[in-house]
Image (cartoon, coloured by chain):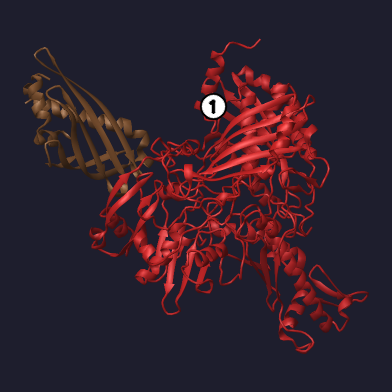
Amino acid sequence: MSATGIGAAVRRKEDHRFITGSGHYTDDINRPGQVYAYFLRSPHAHATIKSIDIKPAANMPGVLAVLTGADLAGDKIGNLICGWMIHSKDGSPMKMAPHPALASGKVCHVGDPFAVVIAETLAQARDAAEKIAVDYEVLPAVADPVAAQKPEAPQIHEIARNNTIYQWHLGDAKSVEAAFRSAKHVTKLDIVNNRLVPNPIEPRAAIGDYDSGTGSFTLWNTTQNPHVARLVIAAFVGMAPEHKLRVIAPDVGGGFGSKIFIYPEEVVALWASKRVGRPVKWVADRSEAFLADAHGRDHVTHAEMAFDGDGKILGLRAKTVANLGAYMSTFSSSVPTYLYATLLSGQYEIPHIYCEVDAVYTNTAPVDAYRGAGRPEATFVVERLVEVGAREMGQDPAELRRNNFVKKFPHQTPVIMTYDVGDYNASLKKAMELADCKGFGKRKRESARSGKLRGIGFSSYIEACGIAPSQAVGSLGAGVGLWESAEVRVNPTGSVEILTGSHTHGQGHETTFAQLVSERLGIPIDNVSIVHGDTDKVQFGMGTYGSRSGAVGMSAIVKALDKIEAKAKKVAAFVLEAAEGDIEFKDGKFSVAGTDKSAAWGDITLNAYIAHKFSGQELEPGLKEGAFYDPTNFTFPAGCHICEVEVDVETGKTEIVAWTAVDDFGIVINPMIVEGQVHGGIAQGVGQALCEGAVYDKDAQLITGSFMDYAMPRADHLPSITVDTTVTKCPSNPLGIKGCGEAGAIAAPAAVINAITDAIGSEEIAMPATAQAVWAALQKLNRMPQAA
Amino acid sequence: LAVPPQTVWEKLNDPAVLKACIPGCEQLDKTSDTEFAAVATVKIGPVKAKFKGRVTLSDLDPPHGYKISGQGDGGVAGFAKGGATVKLTPKDGGTLLAYNVDAQIGGKLAQLGQRLVNGAAKKVADDFFENFAKTVNPAAV
């Protein structure tokens, strides 16, 4: 391993610019003549707009235009779409309601934009928005997904009766029923997977810039996938043909999924720019982010697990109602279906699984993928069932897990996935050693002496990452392929530019991708630059989400580097006057086998461009290659997280006193970055388990709409985390990578809740397990007669 | 209150009295016997906005009580609705005025100030009736 190659804990190249304030985020970019957009958003969860009077606003100082949904429709700007088709059990397609970028005639959630003011300054735009008079007819609203399906619930979209978008299922209901009939024990749980607000540190932003000279648009946008944004805005919204629209995603300050989607505001910024003939900037304030970013999770689930007399799992069944909010966001339909039910086998050999999912509209912000996307929900179901099942049957939870682990690979689950490789017992064993599970009893007694209840919770999670084989996702309804592209441009002096379709917004690609190149070409990482996030530079790409950039994005780079090496060897053969087959390339040096003749990397790259040693008939000059890589399978990162808590009996406050994470991510490129990803993921999972939760009141008003009322995890929620790995090499990509971006957020919630329920001796804890919720559960226990 | 219910009732129906007593009220114009167009500035938590809306008197039961309700549109600040049920009972030659308040807010007001709304509504109502008591009690003049 070289100092900067694969496996080296290299410091992130990008951090200097981020921590010294010299990054370039969308809001740092200002175009000549730029004007500002301010969106008028519905204060009502559900209302008919009877009239809008824009005249007083249009006459305000500095105002260039006040545009409404009617104007948008008049200009034939198309609706936003959901790009993953799900069919119901009865074969009918999902009920996708129209989603215009500006609502027209009716608003469907608090924060639904229906007009925009374009003015010289943001203050002028805001002041003018105050003057717009809107006459609403307020309609009844519903925020709860289960209530939304009831006949008496308000109907949100005409197309979806009982607000039901689809009623989907996966697995074999009959065989599951038979398995449950033969069971010795059945564990049943009702689970609410709480709704989360993503809250990346940089709010969403967009600058639309129309060039009337060329008839082309440029969009600077906080997006995780600029090419997909361009494709949707061109092909579905119909703003401009693809070759007349350039999308640039500059530095992006975190996404966690919420910046995958194509939102109304960027569409409006482009459209308004053409209308007013000036570049139009919009930057969300935090209040807007709470109302209008796609939220995450929000599942209501009943789940059951059947066991035989020895604690072997016989079957699992689950019924989930998933809240998709007021409109179907870009990939919303896939999250509670193919990203969720396909992982319900967990790390276990479960012969029979059946899952039903109803997706529903409510008068809330749209819900879509958020770090883990479906897999945290699946892990929570499986790991709670296993834990509670073990407790109910009086078995050791670790032992029960061990007895049910998948041990032979490849393993076909009853829910589509084929696990390629893994060693689940290895991560459990290592985690239990590192967490000193043997000493837990002693620690519990010590806690009891200071009036604290101590508990321990396991989460043996699995996820499907590296999304994904295009054919496979196509057969499941995806509207796009999920390959990745790379282009390697070698300069005459030997420095290298990597153009990638992946997008980095906190993951550290500028470092890890350069490490791969350094390893392969034997050049310092400082001689490698990573170019991404610009549709005019990178031809096409699918972006970053689903822990795919390592497994898929870097694999594309490997493929392109293979071609570079092959071409460079041809050049070297001419330079070294040897047969191409005799050229060897190692540590940045070309040599002729069996001789002491060699040439450095820089000699060969220069010769590729000066082309003095070969004729044009013999070899094309230059050194530039591209590749598309389509994976052959998902990757399956898995591991074991152990959380230890102390609960204060008097206040119900939970303190996480220890955390051990042992993950199998396959081959690790940069252990320091991986550790950071694990830390961040755990922090987000702990946030979901202990403090985060979006709450809508009975009128579907968001009452956790600021950091005053929506609690984010803080440093003091977390202990010092022990991170370690076990390694089984992923067989489906050339680097053996599985991906690490989501693991912590997937594993953590179940580990925390398993620990708290172990501590207090009650399973009745819903997330977030705030001090109040835990205290209430303790009070309820104390009121009950003591068990014999 | 030290005056009989009939007097209180009359004051409760007098736009000038109402305008003087509604906290933050800048304008109150009678549009019918039971409706007024109003402009008021209200502050709840971090949000301060000028509301335009209607004040309506309903469930009229002279001189025993009514319901006074208001709803206002605060533009980008959201909306507020609320009301008070007022009951007048003769007591010791004067009047016992009892009131019960409810309030509902939406949009930015709810997003930032929902936790504060009950407290804020109670304060607005308390201020109103305190002002009202000062206006009707001869002793206070």
Instruction: Give A302 or A689, whichever is nearer the viewer.
Output: A302
Residue A276 rendering spot, x and y as whole percentages: 35, 69
Residue A99 rendering spot, x and y as whole percentages: 45, 55
Look at the numbered disc 1 and give the secondary structure of its residue.
loop
Tell me the quarter of the picture where residue A424 sits: top right
Residue A777 rendering spot, x and y as whole percentages: 54, 22
Question: Residue at left 59%, top 47%?
Answer: A88
| Residue hosting label 1 | A653
Q: Which tint was used for chain A?
A: red
User: As drawn, is A597 to the left or to the right of A571?
Assistant: right
Instruction: Give A618 or A593, whichever is nearer the viewer.
Output: A618
Q: Tell me the brown chain.
A: B
Tell me the quarter of the picture where residue A766 sits: top right
Residue A519 rendering spot, x and y as whole percentages: 76, 63
Instruction: Give A714 or A231, whichever is nearer the viewer.
Output: A231
Q: Is residue A255 above or below residue A623?
A: above
Spot the residue most to the front: A90
In this figure, what is the number of numbered marks?
A: 1
Residue type indicated by callout 1: Lys
Q: Which quadrant is the N terminus of chain B positioned in? A: top left
* Residue A249 appearing in the image: no
Tell me the quarter of the picture where residue A100 sits: bottom left
Give the chain of mark 1.
Answer: A
* Residue A691 appearing in the image: yes
Spot the residue most to the right: A594
Disc 1 packing (10 Å; few <14; some 14–19; many ≥20): some
Q: Which quadrant is the C terminus of chain B positioned in? A: top left
Instruction: Give A364 or A131, whichever is nearer the viewer.
Output: A364
